[in-house]
Image: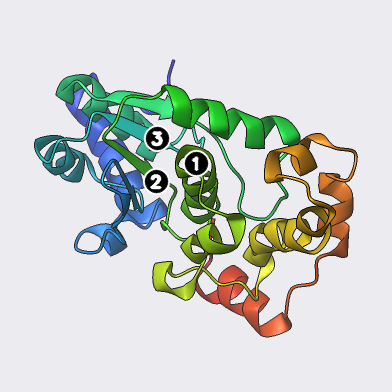
Amino acid sequence: MPAFDLTTPLGRLRTDLDYLWNDHAYLRLGFQNAHWVSDELVRTNQPWPFQLKQWKAAGIRTVINLRGGFDASFHALERDACEKLGLTLVDFTVTSREVPSRARVLGARQMFETIEYPALMHCKSGADRAGIMSVLYEHFRHGKPIREAMAQLSGKYLHVKQGKTGVLDYVFERYLAEGEPAGMSFTDWVESDAYDPAAIKADFRAKWWGTLLTEKLARRE
């Protein structure tokens, strides 16, 4: 039995209310934090079903969910909306406070090579996980240097580098400090022994005020 059953009026009401309140969806009714990374990919926060309908009308064919949350109300509503609208839903779980595994980085490259565009990519706020994946998209899909692609992780998109979510920036900073000077491509560096997610995270230090902002005030996922 699914955690959120949309087959009955009561089940859908329960799902809608959980999504509205527990997923803070009321904050996203009029603000999508939507930005086109290119003419084929847009990054946003978690979309409502009615917003997915609008994106479908704008030409979107694929929706990339970076949150996971397969037993959550948002996923039940998103899956249902995508099925009704004929959108392809791709679940590609990313975390905002961990260094992505080698398999996750290389998996992102493969995903961007194989999905159908135009596509919409989202996490909860559209700031952190959408940010690191937009960096990888720019680099792998369009060949943009990491140094330039890192602009996708900035305050413009509500990303806070100084908090725990700054570990995402630190991944690329380590490459620019170690891999690039050694003449390694980003892919070569990720595939080498130098790419050690646990060690990289252990070396990262967040600023106290940034942590206060992301963990206590904004309560980022």
Q: Is residue 130 left or right of residue 199?
A: left
Q: Which amino acid does the dot numbered 1 rest on?
A: Arg
Residue 154 visible at all: yes
Residue contact between numbered discs 3 and 2, judged by CB atoms under 8 Å: yes
Separation of marks 1 and 2 at Cα, in angstroms: 8 Å
As helix, strand or loop, the secondary structure at mark 2 comes to: strand
Picture residue at 53% right of the left edge, 46% below the top = 139
Circle 1 or circle 3, nearest the eye: 3
As helix, strand or loop, the secondary structure at mark 1 comes to: loop
Residue extending farthest to the front is 183
Residue extending farthest to the bottom is 209
Residue contact between numbered discs 1 and 2, judged by CB atoms under 8 Å: yes
- Residue 157 at x, y = what percent? 41, 67
Residue at the spot of label 3: 64
Residue at the spot of label 1: 67
Residue at the spot of label 2: 122
